[in-house]
Image: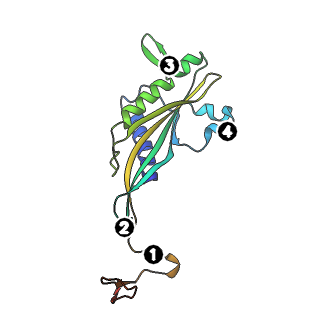
């Protein structure tokens, strides 16, 4: 589910950027985050303006049934918006307008647009609608601004009741032992189901 959610957020942003009339600016990169901001900035800057999406982690998982086969999982995803503007630090965040028309996008506008795209959406997946989380500055230097926005959702993780060990080959039979009350630790009946 984690990969599906990340891919769905990316797909939503790509579709909005390609739509007509679109965002009103061109994004040079929309991708899954792969540590680009850890690299030398001169290598990353040519991809600006850019939006990356990444998995932020799982906050908690809560058991939904006594057998432990269903878990409600709370997950966080992060969108990162990066912009460069040599007109000054303010322009990296606010963008540049000429006669009221956006000429160069800033990270504030990019975050607002991502919010419009994903806020309150389940992305067509079996998840709760995405809720906004914290916003933080990752980079703000030398005409570069990178802001990160968290998105929270929950989904159900299910595990099968039967444990299958792939090292034993194909799963062809299922053995079941029945214990009647009071349980003395010895199976009262057994059955083998051939698949």
- Counting residues from the start of the chain, the first of labels 3 and 2 encountered is 2
Q: Quadrant of residue 22?
A: top left
Percent x, y for residue 135?
A: 49, 31
Question: Dot 4 corresponds to which residue?
Answer: 39
Label 3 Cα crowd, 10 Å radius (few <14 / some 14-19 / many 20+):
some
Asked if the residue at tag 1 contacts the one at tag 4, i.e. Cβ–Cβ closer than 8 Å, the answer is no
- Residue at the image position 45 percent from the left and 47 percent from the top: 6
**Disc 4, SS:** loop
- Residue at the image position 68 percent from the left and 31 percent from the top: 42
Asked if the residue at tag 3 contacts the one at tag 4, i.e. Cβ–Cβ closer than 8 Å, the answer is no
Quadrant of the rendering where the C terminus is positioned: bottom left
Residue 164 is marked as 1
- Counting residues from the start of the chain, the first of labels 3 and 1 encountered is 3
Percent x, y for residue 100?
A: 42, 12
- Residue at the image position 36 percent from the left and 28 percent from the top: 21
Question: Dot 3 corresponds to which residue?
Answer: 94
- Counting residues from the start of the chain, the first of labels 2 and 1 encountered is 2
Question: Dot 2 corresponds to which residue?
Answer: 67
Q: 116 left or right of 137?
A: left
Asked if the residue at tag 1 contacts the one at tag 2, i.e. Cβ–Cβ closer than 8 Å, the answer is no
| Distance between the alpha carbons at the discs numbered 2 and 1 | 17 Å
């Amino acid at each position: 589910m984690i990969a599906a959610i990340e891919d769905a957020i990316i797909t939503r942003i790509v579709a909005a950027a390609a739509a007509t009339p679109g965002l009103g600016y061109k994004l040079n990169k929309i991708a899954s985050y792969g540590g680009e901001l850890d690299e030398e900035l001169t290598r990353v800057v040519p991809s600006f303006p850019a939006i990356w999406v990444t998995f932020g982690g799982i906050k908690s998982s809560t058991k939904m049934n006594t057998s432990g086969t269903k878990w409600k999982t709370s997950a966080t995803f992060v969108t990162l918006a990066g912009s460069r503007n040599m007109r000054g630090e303010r322009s990296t965040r606010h963008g540049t307008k000429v006669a009221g028309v956006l000429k160069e996008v800033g990270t504030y506008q990019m975050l607002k647009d991502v919010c419009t795209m994903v806020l309150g959406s389940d992305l067509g997946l079996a998840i709760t609608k995405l809720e906004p989380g914290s916003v933080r500055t990752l980079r703000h230097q030398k005409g570069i601004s990178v802001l990160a926005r968290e998105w929270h959702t929950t989904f159900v993780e299910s595990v099968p009741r039967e444990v299958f060990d792939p090292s034993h080959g194909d799963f062809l039979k299922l053995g079941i032992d029945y214990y009647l009350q009071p349980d003395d630790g010895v199976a009262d009946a057994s059955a083998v189901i051939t698949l």
